[in-house]
Image (cartoon, rainbow, N blue to C red):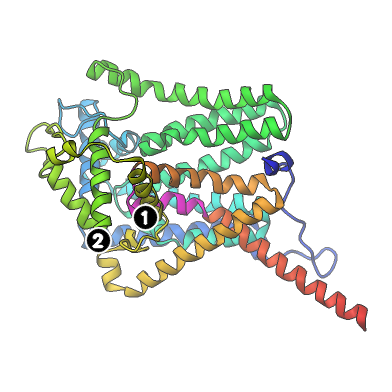
Amino acid sequence: MAMIALATPMAESTQPIPSARAGARPPAWRSPRVACAALFLAVFVPASALIIYYVRGRPFQTDSLYYLQCASVMWRHGEFAQNPGAPLAKDHVAYVMFLAPFVGLLGPQPLAALFVQALLAGAGAILVFGMARRLGGDVAGWAAGLLYASYAPVVVFPAQFVTETLTIFGLLCIVWVNDRMFRAETVSAAARWGALLGALCALTAHVRMIAFPLVAAPAGLYALYALAARRQPARAAIVAGACLGAFALAWSPWVIRNQITFGRPIVLITGLDQTRTATHRVAEMIEQGHEIEAARTTVKEEMFGPAPPIDGAGGPEPALPKAPRTMEASGPPSFTTRARHCAQRLLIMLGLHPKVDAPYPLTGNTVSRLPVVRWAMMGWNRLLLALCAVALLGSLARRDLAWFNTLAIPGALITLYALVHAIPRYQIPSFAALTIPAGVAVARMIDAFHGAGRARAMGCGDKA
């Protein structure tokens, strides 16, 4: 609370650029346009090359085929379903809506959608650079942008019809708008940014349903800031209310659609009981020494049987069966067991669990052909976590709320997964967003190093 009370997020952190002589032009690397173009191309070009590689040499994943089939049904029949006449109340509806026009206009596997994903991944590099530069200057912007561009899943996943790229972009937009909301001088401006933030949170949650509670993080942080730092309870209520109200308004069409389609107001998705049971069973198997992928495959077959056909030839999607009787008879897990499983899932989300490789998102042909990728990803993972630890300690020590906020929102998403359901692939959006505070940490450490060097030089001069 002390940090919040004394934070000064409005301070401008982009420092003037010193030069050796008056009127000298700054070096090209300090130009925001040069940086944005270079970082955008550093992501877009390899992502586009991988799209061509996937099309020519590799089949799409099962998830990709599922989304494409749902998009085809949505375009032709106007309903969210895997097979016509069998509507779904499941996750990822916004991603299916994103794909539907491409599938309807360009065919069953539209490459244009993948190149749009590559564009969004490149645009994410610009958002990362801009946010980090505002907080810590040019070095911070470059450090964050290079961390983002070197995070292999950012480049790999645009080449598949999966939700990671849109989730990353949505999370980065949330972090950017949240910063604008905190820096707004007037209540009306902050409320407008808060309303936009709420709508973005709802849209991102429609891509990944786990983000549904995420709106509470920025709304709660702003309420604490307005109460503790500004002593303005009315401001806290108005801005947080605008954020939550816009979220509810943007979410309401989903609930209304479910009421009309299924006869009951489903707020989230169906099958949550089965998901909880499966999550508990997977956690037990991991504790028994199984690798996470082997545990997930076993539980899927144990609970749900074979996956429904992807090509639609098998008719409507069958209803999920109940959990195994052995699980039902054993009763709900105890509080201690739940806490232990949450800790396990947190380690999975951080890439630190011994039964999970840090470069999990790049397993398969990419890693088997280039083993160095595995070690590079493990090194990247450890480096990011170390820099985030520095960022957390630094933001608390400096009482820098703007810096802390860039940690809090991705951290809240990691926490949600740890509480509910986690596989290593789910870490990708949060890790991509955490490159912002990590880049600022790099710049602050460089500043501290130079400051210590100048202090030693001045001390030596005084002694002389």
The residue nearer to you, when weighing 273 against 358, is: 273
Secondary structure category for the residue under label 2: loop
Which residue is rendered at x = 29% and y = 67% of the image?
366
- Using a 10 Å C-alpha cutoff, classify the residue at mark 1 as few (fewer than 14 neighbours), some (14 to 19) or many (20 or more): many
Look at label 2 and name its amino acid: Gly
Q: Position of residue 399 (x, y in %)?
A: 70, 48
The answer to whether any part of residue 35 appears in the image is yes
321 w.r.t. 122: above or below: above
Discs 2, 1 touching: Cβ within 8 Å = no
121 w.r.t. 94: above or below: below
The residue nearer to you, when weighing 64 against 116, is: 64
Location of mark 2 (residue): 289
332 w.r.t. 48: above or below: above
The answer to whether any part of residue 61 appears in the image is no
- Using a 10 Å C-alpha cutoff, classify the residue at mark 2 as few (fewer than 14 neighbours), some (14 to 19) or many (20 or more): few
Location of mark 1 (residue): 348
Query: Which of the 4 image quadrants contains residue 8?
Result: top right
Q: Is residue 194 magenta?
A: no
Q: Is residue 294 found left or right of 25 in the rendered image?
A: left
Pointer 2 or 1: first along the chain = 2
Position of the N terminus, as image quadrant, is top right
